[in-house]
Amino acid sequence: MTQGNDRALAAINDLKDHSTLKVWSVLVTFFGDLAAAPKTHLIGPVLAALVQPIGIKPEALRVALHRLRKDGWIETSKIGRVSLYALTDFGRQQTNAVRHRVYGAAPEKPADWHIIITAPHSAGDAANGPLHDAIAVSGNTYLLPIRPHPAPPNAFVGSLSVLSDVGWVRDKIAPPEIVTAYEELDALLKGITRNLRSIRQSTLIEQTILRTLILHNWRRILLRHPAAADFALEGWAGSECRRTVLHLMNKLARPSPEALVAALQHPRAAG
């Protein structure tokens, strides 16, 4: 085994142990990154090779695939005895809905912020409707970088040219536990970055697993807070972590499903 394999497997283990992995959720990340385009699929042997190094056993893989089929995320077909798995239209729609947040650069700071105050009895309905991606600063007060359309009924909508950096407001925008999660992940990823030259001498399968686990750990934090937080704060842990993730995504390029099949048949260092 080469030093590159050793470093890649060490990084895979660190990311695998960084957070609790739910098998179905990891598979969603694999499909969303590797087979999001229409008419693309991952074959069973490739999926097995991708999940085995992160401790997912064949039975757990079968159960998770069954759950994703039942929930309408993936569909299955066969060529001979080989199973092919692909995202359904629903699965692709769900994946694409957050694609820009996951892969995109940091959003530009908005020219104006909007403060929305809803009637107390309608706060819950508004949060699930036009304000689903707003920052809730109190029970019925929200912040958005764009004017909500349509505006919630019976709500006050005003503009703010400057978003105050009051501590409790900042904590609402970026709760301390989210900041800590970003800081811890970024520290781990920077360690991987320092070993990237060696890691890139590992096999394509190993690099793909590493790429997916980076994305998975990134997504699970990113999707725990409203997108508006990315607009609100400059120089915070989320922005720094985004830069590290995008750098690694650029260096650990996304392989095609065909390349993964070839790598499974002829394992060798990707270079």
Image (cartoon, grey):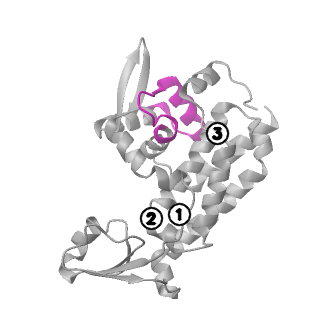
Q: Residue at x 51, y 40 (%)?
A: 33
Q: What residue is shown with label 3?
A: 253
Where's the C terminus, which quadrant? top right
Residue 200 visible in the picture: yes
Describe residue 154's horizontal placement relative to residue 225 as left or right. left
Mark 3: secondary structure: loop
In reply to whether residue 24 is colored magenta, the answer given is: no
Q: Are the residues at dot 3 and dot 1 in contact (C-beta closer than 8 Å)?
A: no
**Badge 3 or badge 1: first in the primary sequence:** 1
Amino acid type for the residue under numbered disc 1: Pro
Residue 187, position as x, y percentages in the image = 68, 62
Residue 176, position as x, y percentages in the image = 53, 76
Where's the N terminus, which quadrant? top right
The magenta stretch is: 31-59
Q: What residue is shown with label 1?
A: 107
Q: Residue furthest front?
A: 111
